[in-house]
Amino acid sequence: MSRVMTIVPLLVGVVAAGWGAVAFGMHEWRNATEEAVVQLEGAPSARGEPVSPDTRGAPELRANAAPFQRVSPAQFTTLPAPVARYFALVLAPEQRVVQRARIDHEGQFALRPNEWKPFTSHQHYVTAPRGFVWDARIRFFPGVPMMVRDSYLGGRGTMRGALAGIVTLVDQDGTPGLASGALLRYLAEAAWLPTALLPSEGVMWAPIDDSTARASLTDAGITVWMDVHFAPSGAMSRVSAIRERDVDGRSIPTPWEGRYSDDLVSVDGMKIPAVAEVAWLLPEGEHAYWRGRIASASYDYRECASAEPSPGRASGCS
């Protein structure tokens, strides 16, 4: 009996120390995420000051690069037909242009094919300068989640993963492949902030056929593209691209897809897909690794101050 009385307090102490470490790790993780969001939103243009899109490779935008505050149907006249139909469907007349967004998701994540684990996530976006911070909690073990944070800030991609915020599993930062993959992710996820896909935001559209067009975007010297497939309703149904995938520290260009539901949610006049799924298309078969549903979506819109006109450039915002 005396031995039991000795062991029990020791076990209680070990458990308490373990839970204390988990609580501390998650607290430190939250602090690091908050710092990343502050950095994301701290750039001058993220505070609503005048911005110009990155128009490298887009000569038709250079002559008048004043920022747009509201969407005009005149912006659709030169777009491929399926793209024009898409914007007519998902944007309200005189739609305000998104400057910041917060999208919360809940769903499932699979590190290995078909090994799905529940997750919740919070993602912050800024459209000028472009960037995001994604913070997810994946339930691998009861009470001990895996924390994952991906970001694209200043043309730089990062990926962090830690069990309970303590045991580091992934820590990658600053490689060209990571930046390219993160920017492509931003472009594909713009389905949840569709004004970010407008030509005035630097996205170039090229026709493929009556239901498909190619979107390309240049940022910080990085150019990415994706083929966008539209449903008969006009909604975006699927995107496909070659995306950089990390394999044992090497960046491997790999076929990749994002798929969106026909179920659209209306928020502030915009229609966005309620459900999506993402997959790598590997030689050995498809690896769907993320599927989620919108839990909430909120937006801040661009506010533009008047600017001094210059030759060939309008002043202020449209």
Image (cartoon, rainbow, N blue to C red):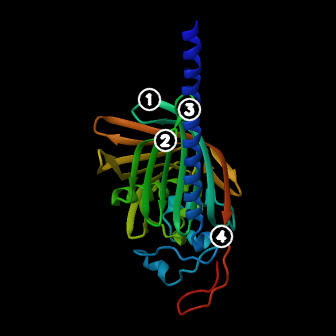
User: Which of the labelled discs sits on residue 147, or is there none?
Assistant: none
- Judge the density around disc 3: few (<14), some (14-19), many (≥20) Cα neighbours within 10 Å: few
- Name the mark nearer the viewer: 4 or 3: 3
Q: Give the labeled residue for mark 2.
A: 166
- In the picture of the structure, the residue carrying the numbered disc 1 is 115
Label 3 with label 2: CB-CB less than 8 Å? no
Discs 1, 4 touching: Cβ within 8 Å:
no
Observer-nearest of 214 and 166: 166
For mark 4, give the secondary structure: loop
Position of residue 161 measured from the top left corner of the image (x, y, whole percent): 45, 44
Give the farthest residue toward the top: 1
Q: Examine the rendered structure and indicate whether residue 66 appears above or below residue 15.
A: below
Residue in the image at 34% along x and 60% along y:
176
Residue 211, image x, y percentages: 47, 53
x, y percent for residue 136: 54, 44
Quadrant of image for the C terminus: bottom right
Which residue in the protein does label 3 denote? 17
Indicate the quadrant where residue 68 lies.
Answer: bottom right
Question: Which residue occupies 52% across, 38% down?
Answer: 164
> Spatial distance from mark 2 to mark 4, Cα to Cα?
38 Å
Q: Residue 302 carries which label?
A: 4
Which of these two is toward me, 242 or 42?
42
